[in-house]
Image: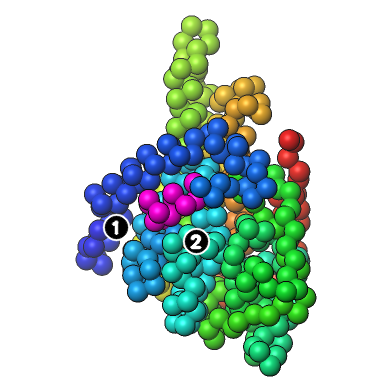
Amino acid sequence: MTNVPEACVEFRFTPEHLELQRTVRRFLSEVSPEARVRADAETAAGWDPGIWRRLCAELGLPALAVPEQYGGHGFGLTELGIAFTEAGAGLVCAPLLSTSLAIRAILESGDKEAASTQLPALAAGTVTGTLAAHEPGRGWENPATRAVRTDDGWSLTGHKNWVLDGHTAGLLVVSAVTEQGPALFLVGAAAPGLRTVPIDTVDLTRTAADLELTAVPATLLGADGGALRRTLDAGLVLLAAEQTGVAQHCLDMAGEYARQREQFGRPIGMFQAVKHKLANVLLEVEAATSAMMYALWAADHRPAELPAAAAIAAATCAEAALLAAGENIQVHGGMGATWEHPAHLYLKRATTSRLLLGDPQQHLERLAVHIGLGAPPAGQAPNGTSPHPERQEDAWQDGWKAKSPS
């Protein structure tokens, strides 16, 4: 975004950003149309390695926010967020979010050795990664997985669930607790004692897995206890960008149909009820876009503001995507609820993404704590982690693990 004096900060994409947006949009429309998305979703991996190689080789998407010394392009989250917006609009089946989380965790850890050895392959896409931090009933930042020192390094034992692309990732960044507190560890996919189990989710376009770790050898990733929280904040911003893409695409889809579909001799978009629906969605999409752009800017230019900006974007964009996807089906009528129409795919993505890194209520609670409107409730960590992670677990059970029809 443009560099302007602090007194008149203005959020808008530069011509270079807009060209990146057009390039990614054009490329994704060619290599991943709806038919390709549906076909990829039916595979065991959940994504096409050939398309992933093209995304990495021709667009360099996972390398966008990786420093040049580690094989990346040296841009920030703003550029990567633009790519995520277009990927969300196209529901692209690819391990982009999972690999980006792994990359961000390595960067946030400050571990230069790990960055030098792991980031070039992740940036090139020859290795995919993921973040394994969520645990049943404990949320994202309160691990029960134990890390024990061994003669060769560390050993991890525990259970992780809802690990994005966990059954295909070549490198896992795993959270565990040591005698000194929570920490992050690197685990290879072929490590002994590691068992991954793909799970059925309501979103066909995004895969997840459960992980069982039994004395799994691991390498300590840095020594910064705040690396996980910063990684999750960056992940929230990227997810918000994706959700904004979903919301905007659903609005465009509904608007186009409302202009074309006629009832009683005129387009249904001329009826007040339909106008009101689309106007409400437009307001939410505009708010989501603003929140997302500010969060991307904060991530690159004002890191101290990122926790609040990420929470605002996460809550705003999640609700906008869900509203836009639901109203899109309503505008399309009975056709929008059929398996053959793509509207349900966007509704499922919006539903699961809303819960992926915490629900909107959790984000708002953390925002309130961060801006000083209240102290963390009893039992809540100072960083704003919810004292009731089981609430998210219940939501996951309802929103993610419902098996989709085949």
The structure residue drawn at horizontal position 56% and vertical position 39%, both measured from the top left corner, is 37
Q: Is residue 298 visible?
A: no
> Residue 373: image x %, image y %?
54, 70
Determine which quarter of the picture holds residue 337: top right
Give SS at disc 2.
Answer: loop
> Residue 83: image x %, image y %?
41, 51
Q: Alpha carbon of mark 1 to alpha carbon of mark 2: how far?
A: 30 Å
Residue 45 magenta-drawn? no
**Residue 1 circle label:** 1
Category of crowding for the residue at label 1, using alpha-carbon neighbours closer than 10 angstroms: few (below 14), some (14–19), many (at least 20): some
Category of crowding for the residue at label 2, using alpha-carbon neighbours closer than 10 angstroms: few (below 14), some (14–19), many (at least 20): some
Q: Residue furthest top?
A: 265
Nearer to me, 48 or 87 = 48
Is 300 displayed left or right of 270 in the figure? left
Residue 57 magenta-drawn? yes
> Is residue 7 positioned above or below 341 on the image?
below
The structure residue drawn at horizontal position 35% and vertical position 74%, both measured from the top left corner, is 69
Prevalent SS, magenta region: helix
Which residue is identified by label 2? 126
The structure residue drawn at horizontal position 29% and vertical position 58%, both measured from the top left corner, is 1
Q: Quarter holding the C terminus? A: top right
Determine which quarter of the picture holds residue 304: bottom left
Name the colour scheme: rainbow
> Residue 160: image x %, image y %?
72, 67
The answer to whether the residues at label 1 and label 2 have Cβ atoms under 8 Å apart is no
> Is residue 87 positioned above or below 338 on the image?
below
Disc nearest the viewer among 1 and 2: 2
Q: Amino acid at mark 1?
A: Met
Q: Specify the segment rendered in magenta.
A: 51-61
